[in-house]
Image: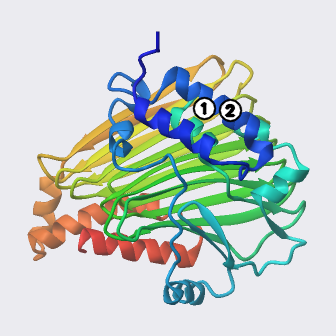
């Protein structure tokens, strides 16, 4: 008797996709591909009762919209767009990923190979064991990525080097009259005493639906310092799910900044494993939603060693019929004494139809720690609006000024000056300041 699972259509498509690969797959990924497919056959995709996806119906969002039994259509980016992006980021490393595929020809690496080495996932896998990095199939969409992903890059920061030029990645979905999809898997390896900034722009073009399932793995070795900036401006028909896994060694620093401005359904999973003393983990997020956009941020920090700090601040402003979800978990293991962990989530609802579900969580097994968490959700402060109007500022302007002041706390965390200005401009435009 067949097992009754949710998302059977997606499982069947995954099985068909594997059957269609016909030897084109990266062989070193085969073991995990098989395990991931078996996981999906046994467990299916999240249904209405799945705790981790109870507020975000991703299975429904992608079912019946995409033919995932075959490879994504190959759509090229307009050369004018490529030229504009390169001109905008002159002097930086610029990488393009189109519908889940790394665009080698149009990418441009300016940093010397002694600092930054970019190679294809296929070439890296031929010389290194990468299965250990992708063995986690506990999340069904991570397992789905393990089934499909067959392209990506490995970016390595050399030991003791600081990559002065940022590594800017453009993840672009393109459809040409048909719904399209893409799966990609990248590894970012910061060796001992190295430093680099990664800036990821997520965009989508075309009038049809797109679906991207992305997997990022960051390995931050001893005393390395890595920042990840993620700016999401997908189309109103774009479904995106990203799994970012981070592994930190002793005295390392990892900082994540996520700005979500558009999309149909966006799910960001961020999992940080702190496995060395003296580490610092920073997580900042801002989501400004409108229309029917649905944004879900799930974060986890697992403190395994003592004398570490983690800081988390996410803020959201939701308008129209949009929805926001925040679920943050902090684990402090018994060995992680002297841990300082702080978590905060604040939300403002601008309409009666906007909704947010927020759930900060702490699980602590150590007894000598400083940890706090909290969340707030409300509407605009009418007294503050009255105060500004009493000084000659019209109501709309007063409203926008209060919103900008609220979200600026997150924007100010951005350490790249040019990017802070760009994000500030986008926020001001969105808030109509």
- The residue nearer to you, when weighing 421 against 370, is 421
Task: Residue under label 2, please give it.
Answer: 34
- Asked if disc 1 and disc 2 are in contact, CB closer than 8 Å, the reply is yes
- Number of numbered discs present? 2
Place of residue 40 in the rendered image (x, y in percent of width and height, measured from the top left): 54, 28
Q: In this view, does 424 lie above or below 332?
A: below
Q: In this view, does 257 lie above or below 334?
A: below
Place of residue 228 in the rendered image (x, y in percent of width and height, measured from the top left): 61, 59
In the rendered view, does 264 fall on the left or right side of 104?
A: left
In the rendered view, does 7 fall on the left or right side of 70?
A: left
- The residue nearer to you, when weighing 22 against 3, is 22
Residue 403 image-quadrant placement: bottom left
> For the residues marked 1 and 2, what is the alpha-carbon distance in whole angstroms?
5 Å
As drawn, which residue projects farthest toward the top? 1
Check the picture and name the quadrant holding the C terminus. bottom left
- Is residue 116 something one can see in this rendering? yes
- The residue nearer to you, when weighing 331 against 13, is 13
Q: Residue 37 shows which numbered tag?
A: 1
- Residue at the (68%, 32%) spot, across then down: 34
Q: In this view, does 328 lie above or below 76?
A: above
């Amino acid at each position: 008797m067949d097992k009754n699972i949710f998302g059977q259509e997606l499982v069947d498509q995954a099985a068909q996709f594997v059957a269609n690969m016909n030897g084109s797959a990266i062989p070193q990924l085969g073991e995990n591909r098989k395990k991931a497919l078996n996981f999906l056959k046994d467990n299916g995709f999240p249904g209405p009762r799945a705790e981790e996806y109870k507020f975000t119906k991703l299975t429904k969002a992608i079912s019946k919209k995409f033919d995932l039994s075959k490879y994504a259509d190959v759509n090229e980016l307009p050369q004018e767009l490529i030229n504009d992006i390169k001109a905008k980021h002159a002097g930086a490393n610029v990488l393009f990923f189109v519908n889940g595929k790394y665009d080698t020809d149009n990418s441009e690496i300016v940093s010397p190979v002694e600092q930054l080495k970019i190679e294809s996932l296929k070439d890296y896998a031929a010389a290194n064991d990468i299965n250990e990095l992708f063995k986690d199939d506990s999340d069904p969409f991570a397992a789905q990525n393990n089934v499909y992903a067959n392209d990506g890059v490995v970016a390595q920061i050399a030991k003791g080097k600081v990559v002065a030029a940022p590594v800017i990645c453009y993840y672009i979905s393109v459809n040409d009259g048909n719904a399209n999809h893409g799966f990609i898997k990248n590894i970012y390896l910061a060796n001992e005493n190295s430093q680099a900034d990664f800036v990821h722009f997520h965009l989508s073009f075309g009038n049809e639906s797109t679906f991207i399932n992305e997997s990022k793995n960051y390995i931050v070795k001893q005393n390395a310092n890595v920042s990840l900036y993620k700016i999401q401006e997908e189309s109103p028909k774009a479904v995106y799910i990203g799994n970012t896994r981070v592994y930190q060694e002793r005295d390392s620093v990892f900082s994540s900044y996520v700005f979500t401005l558009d999309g149909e359904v966006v799910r960001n999973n961020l999992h940080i494993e702190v496995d060395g003393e003296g580490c610092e983990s920073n997580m900042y997020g801002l989501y400004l939603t409108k229309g029917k956009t649905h944004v879900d941020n799930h974060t986890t920090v697992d403190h395994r060693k003592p004398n570490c700090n983690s800081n988390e601040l996410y803020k959201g402003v939701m308008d129209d019929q949009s929805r926001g979800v925040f679920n943050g978990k902090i684990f402090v293991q018994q060995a992680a004494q002297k841990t300082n962990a702080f978590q905060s989530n604040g939300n403002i609802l601008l309409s009666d139809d906007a909704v947010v579900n927020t759930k900060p969580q702490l699980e602590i097994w150590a007894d000598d720690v400083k940890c706090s968490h909290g969340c707030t959700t409300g509407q605009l402060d009418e007294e503050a609006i009255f105060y500004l109007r009493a000084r000659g500022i019209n109501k709309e302007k007063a409203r926008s000024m209060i919103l900008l002041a609220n979200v600026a706390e997150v924007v100010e965390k951005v350490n790249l000056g040019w990017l802070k200005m760009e994000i500030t401009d986008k926020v001001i435009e969105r808030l109509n300041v």
